[in-house]
Image (cartoon, rainbow, N blue to C red):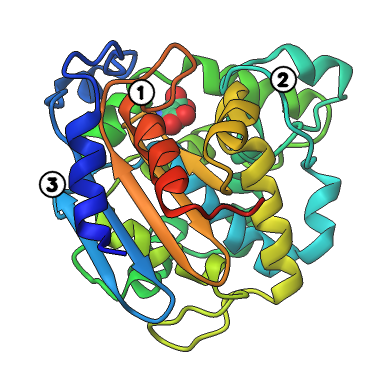
């Protein structure tokens, strides 16, 4: 099958008018051109297929939660699940509601509360968390040019009241140990990582390859841990639209409010789509439509 042609055909079939809306609750995110579109698929045996602005870096936002989750899981192994659950939340990414009933243990590591706990865990283990995260991501994608967007990180920090509230609430249950300012600084930088579709599709390949990064041959996590990370993405990777994404696309993945979506077919490939306007659940409107068409055209999904 000619994947480049499939990409072009699906893109041409997307509705000309995008009914999604670019995220602007973090002012810096609202500055992106809504018409940007890029996609890249990278296979575990090293083939790459790209279309549109696949080399243009964008704010990966919550997609980065998978990187910190992997780093914390490497260090704590199953002890991590005492601090954060693995159940889909069915609530928006920044919701406080379930934390009261769940005694300060977030439902999963993909919602903000869970990602903040993961950051808290990493602060206990890493001397320089921001530098170590950057070097982890650079090594996964074999690309030293990846960096934080300082303006986005600052904009996140200036608008972090909700995340601070999540931290303090969880602290009241004993599930946060470090200073909120330090956790927020790390978390807001995490969200402000900038990567392009190509870099993202390469960096997630270890999750399609039983835990081994195909580019370096390095084992990142065990195959059992890979299964669990993919399961979390499948059930929790799309805010309160994880069921809809599974139903339409049928792959584990993670989205971010920058309009990026990463998805992967274990044993085969990782694909990243970027289109900034979001649907009302916070997932890229055209990104979801594109991936639904893609798995339908190629006739493969995990199901
Ligand atoms: N930066 C966001 C926030 O915590 C999270 C982004 C996302 O869900 O993609 O407000």
Q: Residue at x 46, y 68 (%)?
A: 205
Residue 271 percent coordinates (x, y)? 38, 55
Quarter of the image where one finds residue 275: top left
Between residues 69 and 258, which one lies in front from this camera angle? 258
Ligand 1 within 8 Å of the CB at mark 2: no
- Going from N to C along the chain, the mark reached first, 2 or 1, is 2
Quarter of the image where one finds residue 108: top right
**Eyeballing the image, is 168 above or below 250?**
above
Between residues 94 and 9, which one lies in front from this camera angle? 9
Label 3: how many Cα within 10 Å (few below 14, some 14–19, many 20+): some
Is 233 situated left or right of 67 in this image? right
Quarter of the image where one finds residue 109: top right
Circle 1 is placed at which residue position?
A: 285
Are the residues tagged 2 and 1 within 8 Å (C-beta)?
no
Circle 2 is placed at which residue position?
A: 169
Query: Residue 148, can we see it?
Result: no
Where disc 3 sits, the SS reads: strand
């Amino acid at each position: 099958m000619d994947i480049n042609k499939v990409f072009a055909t699906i893109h041409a079939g997307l509705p000309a008018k995008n009914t999604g809306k670019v995220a602007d609750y973090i002012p810096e995110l609202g500055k992106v051109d809504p018409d940007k579109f890029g996609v890249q698929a990278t296979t575990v045996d090293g083939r790459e297929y790209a279309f549109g602005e696949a080399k243009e870096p964008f704010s990966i936002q919550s997609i980065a939660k998978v990187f910190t989750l992997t780093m914390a899981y490497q260090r704590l192994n199953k002890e991590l699940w005492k601090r954060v659950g693995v159940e889909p939340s069915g609530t928006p990414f920044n919701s406080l509601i379930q934390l009261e009933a769940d005694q300060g243990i977030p439902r999963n590591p993909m919602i903000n509360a869970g990602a903040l706990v993961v950051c808290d865990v990493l602060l206990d283990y890493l001397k320089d968390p921001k530098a170590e995260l950057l070097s982890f991501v650079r090594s996964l994608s074999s690309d030293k040019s990846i960096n934080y967007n300082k303006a986005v990180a600052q904009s996140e920090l200036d608008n972090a009241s909700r995340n601070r509230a999540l931290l303090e609430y969880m602290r009241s249950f004993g599930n946060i140990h470090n200073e909120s300012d330090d956790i927020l600084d790390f978390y807001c930088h995490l969200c402000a990582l900038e990567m392009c579709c190509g870099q993202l599709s390469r960096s997630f390949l270890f999750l399609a390859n039983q835990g081994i990064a195909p580019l370096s041959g390095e084992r990142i996590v065990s195959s059992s841990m890979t299964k669990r990370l993919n399961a979390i993405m499948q059930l929790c990777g799309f805010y309160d639209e994880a069921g809809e994404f599974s139903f339409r696309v049928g792959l584990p993945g993670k989205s971010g409010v920058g309009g990026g979506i990463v998805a992967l077919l274990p044993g085969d490939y990782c694909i990243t789509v970027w289109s900034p306007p979001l649907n009302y659940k916070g997932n890229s409107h055209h990104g979801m439509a594109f991936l639904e068409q893609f798995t339908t055209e190629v006739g493969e999904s995990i199901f």
